[in-house]
Amino acid sequence: MQKSQAQEFSFIIAAGGQGSRFNSHERKQFMTLNNKELWVHSAEIASQTGIDEIILVIPQECMTRDYNCSVNIKLVAGGSSRPESVMNGLLASSKKYALIHDGARPLLTANLIEKLINNTTDERGCIPVMPVSEALKHISGDDISSVPREDLYTTQTPQSFNREKLILALRNNMQVKDEAEAWLDSGNKLNHVAGERENIKITYPEDLEFAQKLSRENIIMRTGIGYDIHRLIPERKLILGGVLIPDSKLGLLGHSDSDVLTHAVMDSILGACRLPDIGNLFPASDEKFKDANSIELLSQVMSLVKSSGCEVDYVDSVVKAQVPRLNKYRDEIIAGLSKFFEFNLKFKSGENLDDNGRGLCIEAQALATVIKRRCE
């Protein structure tokens, strides 16, 4: 699938429900899985396929809450029912086609999105389906009867359609269980692709527990180490973790801004992702990196990480310096780097040993943990 093809699709996340069956004081779409709200997982996967319009439909009263997501999203207020909420998302979209996804299905994969996109046309929508594998029974009062399961399928999301045709279909029937029902009721045709067993919908508390188990089983965790050292010299600014240290009379010698901490952090992340180190990515022999802002270089590294299918989980670091005293800047440095990932920092003295202990240099070490999902 070409990314240009994905850019013809909007990805609409229906997260406007009350989640009453979840039996929680918090709306289920805002519950967390691996420290992210459920809907965030789907938004990030959609972005990886090249989709650049992601719409999150939420209850009107939730429009002012904070939404922490690594990709750009458009917030749209939902309605009193799912069809109304989906309609609001469709009307806010600018694309020719739309993928409609449940906000409480966090284990979506890029592969499923791509299959749906490749099988959607102007005339035919496309849905993911799974064959019913359990024996079925119909219960009415005390009467129980068997229901043949042959040719029966359950339907998942995302569901993919021509946007204008889906708007017309929903206007004709706002009492449907899903978008495919409205589409078919309007006389339109559907393609179907194989759904995924792990693409479960979080409806009850035990579903979230199951999703946590599936998520743990489908991720690879990797660690990487980073180390950097720069000599202290006069007439240079001292920058650590993107923060200017104003009371230092010495700065670090180097081709870029010589931010020894950010350099170590970048190398730890790149190592965990099996990517080249900063010496290869941003060589000192290249004049365009002279006095480069290391935080801007970190932003480029994070783009590479995303393209590799990895995600930074946590970075721990140590800065070793005899001079200057740095602990008062710790919170500011952590706050800046925590915009990219969860981050921790310690300062250690050189204890008057070696060049560091004599105040001739500053060293930094970092250890990064990244995750990569097997299903992507």
Image (spheres, rainbow, N blue to C red):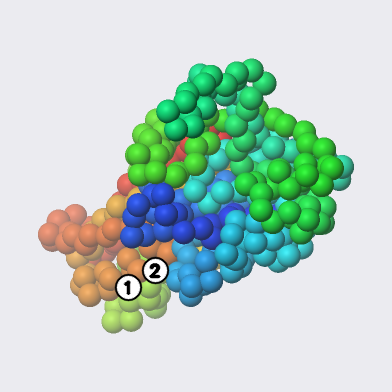
User: Which residue is denoted by mark 1 in the rendering?
Assistant: 332
Q: Quadrant of the N terminus?
A: top right
Query: From mark 1 to mark 2, how far is it between C-alphas?
Result: 6 Å
Q: Position of residue 42 (x, y in %)?
A: 55, 48
Q: Nearer the viewer, residue 156 or 355?
A: 156
Residue 200 lies, in percent from the top left, at 50, 37
- The correct choice, above or below, for 194 with respect to 277 in the image is above
Residue 333 located left or right of residue 67:
left
Front-lying residue, 79 or 364: 79
Counting labels gives: 2
Three-letter residue code for mark 2 = Gly
The tag on residue 336 is 2
- Horizontal side, residue 150 vs residue 134: left or right: right
| Numbered disc 2: secondary structure | helix
Whether residue 262 is situated above or below residue 116 in the rendered picture: below
Q: Nearer the viewer, residue 144 or 172?
A: 144
Q: Residue at x 41, y 49 (%)?
A: 21
Residue 87 visible, this angle: yes
Residue displayed at 60% across by 23% down: 131
Residue at 29 percent of width and 54 percent of height: 317
Proximity of marks 1 and 2: CB atoms separated by less than 8 Å:
yes
